[in-house]
Image (cartoon, rainbow, N blue to C red):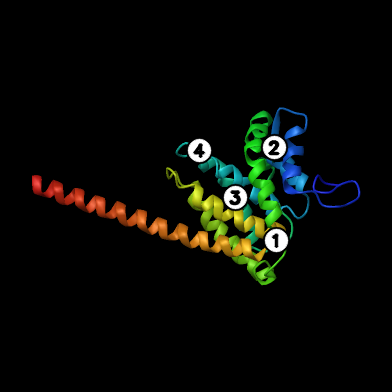
Amino acid sequence: MTLTETSTGRPRAFSDVVEMLGARDGSRLTLGEIVEAFGDRAFGPVMFFFALINMLPWPPGGTTLTGAPLVLLSMELALGRDTLWIPGWAGRASVNRQTFRKLSRRLLKPLHFTERLARPRLYILTGGLGQGLIGLACLFLSVVLVLPIWGGNLLPAVAIGFFSLGVMQRDGLAVLIGWLLTGATVAVLFLAWALIVAAVEHGLRWFGHLF
């Protein structure tokens, strides 16, 4: 029996599993322990877990490490795997459990609110093809997270969070919101690139006038 089930076999809420992981003994919480806790259907919960971590205000480059597991998870989801697999070295990656407890307490209130809203609907968006497309979108978003862009973690992390919630609860509306946020992420990236190119061109012209 995994942490996602009660003694009677009924599923636990995601927020309850997060609290139980923090309450366990041991100074370190490993990725392998998280995957094991969520069991065979771990894609949605584990991706949602890392999406929440990446929504936190990290310093520039911080999401390079916290976003890396999402690259692997997204690739597996895009390839249509039924169960989540992680290599041994990744399973040994860990965080301080006390730090995890502090961070999870900050997230429990929005988690409870989200769980009350989510429910199965619009199944076509969470079926086999839908999950494959979600995996591709999350792969793109997780690569954006890994890039050391200041302030660039929030929008893709929230998008992955909605995609993960959709997979976890079979909620097509959450997936639809994830797609809208993915489009917004693409638009922001194009705008940022255009501004960078314009700034470089302006700088080159300015230097040209000087010399």
Residue located beneath label 3 in the image = 70
Residue 43: tell me if it is visible: no
Label 3 sits on what residue type? Leu
Task: Compare marks 2 and 1 and give the one earlier in the sequence.
Answer: 2
Query: CA separation, marks 4 and 1?
Result: 31 Å
Q: CA distance from mark 2 to mark 4?
A: 20 Å
Q: For residue 30, which numbered disc appears in the image?
A: 2
Tag shown at residue 81: 1
Instruction: From this view, report whether residue 56 is shown above or below residue 133.
Output: above
Q: Considering the numbered disc 2 on the image, is that residue within a helix, a strand or a loop?
A: strand
Within 10 Å of disc 3 (Cα), the crowding (few <14, some 14-19, many 20+) is: many
Query: Which residue reaches farthest bottom?
Result: 124
Where residue 13 sits in the image (x, y, percent)?
76, 49
Left or right: 131 as drawn, with respect to 2: left
Quote the CA–CA distance across marks 2 and 1.
22 Å
Which badge, 4 or 3, comes first in the chain's sequence?
4
* Residue annotated with mark 4: 58
Q: Nearer the viewer, residue 106 or 58?
A: 106
Q: CA distance from mark 4 to mark 3?
A: 16 Å
Amino acid type at image mark 1: Arg
The mark tally for this picture is 4
**Residue 178 lies in what quarter of the image?**
bottom right
Q: Nearer the viewer, mark 4 or mark 1?
A: 4
